[in-house]
Amino acid sequence: RAFKVSKYSEVVQMLGHVFRRSSTALYCLGFYLTLAVCIFSSLLYYAELGEWDPVELKYMRTGVDGIPKPTPFESIPATLWWAVVTVTTVGYGDLSPQSAPGKVVAAITMVVGVLTLAMPMGVIGNNFTAVWREFEMDKRMRTIWENEDKKAIHDSQFRAEPLEN
C-alpha cells in the first residue's frame, strides 16, 4: 500500500528520481562507510585489547578509575557495533574506549564518519535541484497545454463548421 501512494504523490516521485540519479554517489557512500567501519573496528580492537588475564580468561583493560575490568571489545566483530554507531554519528555511548590510543582512534573515526557522510550530499543536492527544475517546467508545460486545449475547445464551439478554416 505504501508504494501505491508514490504513484499519486509528486513529492515521493520526485525523491525517487533524485535517489535514482544519485545512485552512484549512494553506492560510494555505502562502500566507504563499510570500509571505514571495518578499518576502525580493527584499529580500536587492537588499541583497547589490554592484557590477557589467565585467571579470568579474558583481556583486561584498566578503566578510568584504575581498576582492571574486562574489555567490552572482545573481538573485531564485536567492535563493529561501536564502529557503526560512531561512523554514523549516532553515538549511543554503550561502549567507549578508555586508553589514549583508543581515544585517538575514536576521534579519527568520528571525523572520518562526518566527512564520509558529507561527501555525497553535494551530488544529491545538485540532483534534487535539477529534478525540482524539471518538475516545475513540466508543471508549467502542462498548464500551457491545458489552456491551449481549453481555448481550442472554446474556439471550435463558435465555428459554424469546425472543420473549415
Image (cartoon, rainbow, N blue to C red):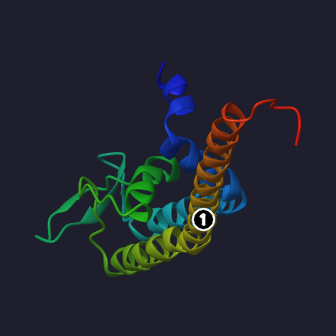
Question: Which element is circle 1 on?
Answer: helix
User: Would residue 51 be seen by someone viewing this image from the given angle?
Assistant: yes
Residue 23: name its quadrant: bottom right
Q: Quadrant of residue 160?
A: top right
The residue carrying pointer 1 sits among few (fewer than 14), some (14 to 19) or many (20 or more) residues within 10 Å by Cα, namely few
**Viewer-closest of 92 and 61:** 92
Is residue 49 visible in the rendered structure shown here?
no
Residue in the image at 57% along x and 68% along y = 129
Residue at left 62%, top 40%?
150
Quarter of the picture containing the C terminus is: top right
Q: Nearer the viewer, residue 138 or 27?
A: 138
- Horizontal side, residue 13 vs residue 114: left or right: right
**Relative to 67, is 79 above or below?**
above
Which of 9 and 70 lies nearest the eye of the viewer? 9
Residue positioned 57% across, 42% down in the render = 13
The quadrant in which residue 87 appears is bottom left
Residue 65 position in % (x across, y down): 10, 70
- Seen at 63% across and 66% down, the residue is 130
Extreme residue in the left direction: 65
Q: Position of residue 100 (x, y in %)?
A: 32, 81
**Residue position for label 1:** 133
Q: Position of residue 63 (x, y in %)?
A: 19, 67
Q: What amino acid type should be assigned to the residue bearing mark 1?
A: Arg
Would residue 127 appear left or right of 101 to someone viewing this image? right
Q: Is residue 45 above or below residue 111?
A: above
